[in-house]
Image (cartoon, rainbow, N blue to C red):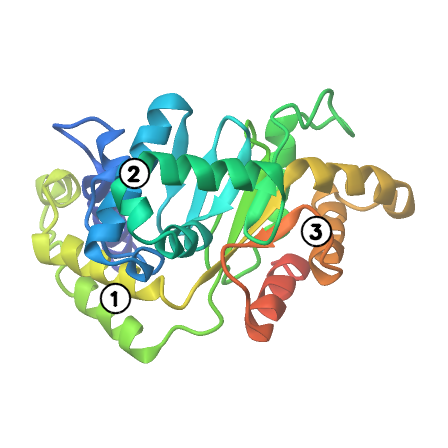
Amino acid sequence: MWIALGVIAALVVGVALWWKFRDPLRGEDFYKFHVERKWAWELILTDEQEQAFMAGLEAYDDESTVYPHREAGALRVYHPSMMVSLFLLAEQFAALGPQAIADPAGAVRHLLDRAARSETGGVLHLDDDWMAEPVDGLDKYDFTSAMMTATHAQGVDGGYGDEDGGYGMLTVLTQTPQHVSRMYDDAHSHASPGEIRNRLDIYKAVIEEPEPEFVEGLERADAERSRFTNTLMYDYGRVLAGYRNMRPHMAYAEPADVMSTVLARMLAENQPGVTWTRAPSPEQHQRALDLISTRG
């Protein structure tokens, strides 16, 4: 019975997250830019600046596709192919002052053109053709799967991999503040499926719209949590180059172990191909190393 209730609870949470991100009216692209101002990088800007900044991103998106990983604080730019910290862009946009408010499209274009010229902290240049042919029998999908294994230790705080763009992200949280834990506990207290008496009750628990208090509570907790997280961004192409060099020295290791070794060295030595959405604390840097180096 306990197992059944656990499964139901998991299903309810899963459906709630689907409902949270579903988009019945406006289309997916609308919510790339027109959403509530709540993430940590957005709070760098005033209300007026944030609205202008998002309008500038939307204008750039009309010319050259971008995708904001809002919670991670990272912007995927497709042409030219790169990842750019939204914290960095928000700070630079604010520094432009009234000029950015007057011409947000021009301001964002200027900032992204600058990012494309130089791979500085918070900017990661990518190669869409990072894997020309399979390596060790791994195609880009297999490689991405192995990278997820290489970077996802037990208790990992979050991650993402894109085999086509050739990049990955690892979210780092050194310790969840008590008040954030309480916010999540409060949200989940509204997610109870109620009494499960028969199969019909199970179907209702899964398909019915989640309680608004549950969804709103999760959103508030996620937004507050983002104040304490940092995101490591890394380039698959340069991990692959390191993999080719390291493989002869780790001939019998699993691919994920080789990737883990390569990425850990890149991070420890601050090599090109890795960067953060904002300058990491020593604890965040060590946390990332631990997550990359220890799995299971």
Q: Residue at x 64, y 50 (%)?
A: 274
In this orientation, which residue lies closer to the viewer: 246 or 114? Answer: 114
Mark 3 or mark 1, which is nearer to you? Answer: 3
Q: Residue at x 72, y 62 (%)?
A: 268
Mark 2 or mark 1, which is nearer to you? Answer: 2
Circle 3 is placed at which residue position? 263
Q: Quadrant of residue 29?
A: top left
Horizontal relation, residue 286 to residue 57: left or right? right
- 13 vs 286: above or below: above
Numbered circle sitting on residue 103: 2
Of the residues shown, which amino acid type is indicated by label 3?
Answer: Leu
Cα separation between marks 2 and 1: 39 Å
Cα separation between marks 2 and 3: 40 Å
As drawn, the residue found furthest toward the bottom would be 178
Query: Measured from the top left, where is residue 134 in percent x and y?
Result: 73, 23
Image quadrant containing the C terminus: bottom right
Of the residues shown, which amino acid type is indicated by label 2?
Answer: Asp
In this orientation, which residue lies closer to the viewer: 283 or 157? Answer: 283
Circle 1 is placed at which residue position? 184
Crowdedness near tag 2: few (<14), some (14–19) or many (≥20) residues, C-alpha within 10 Å = some
One can see residue 191 in this view: no
Mark 2 or mark 3, which is nearer to you? Answer: 2
Q: Earlier in the sequence, mark 2 or mark 1?
A: 2
Query: Measured from the top left, where is residue 9 in percent x and y?
Result: 23, 54
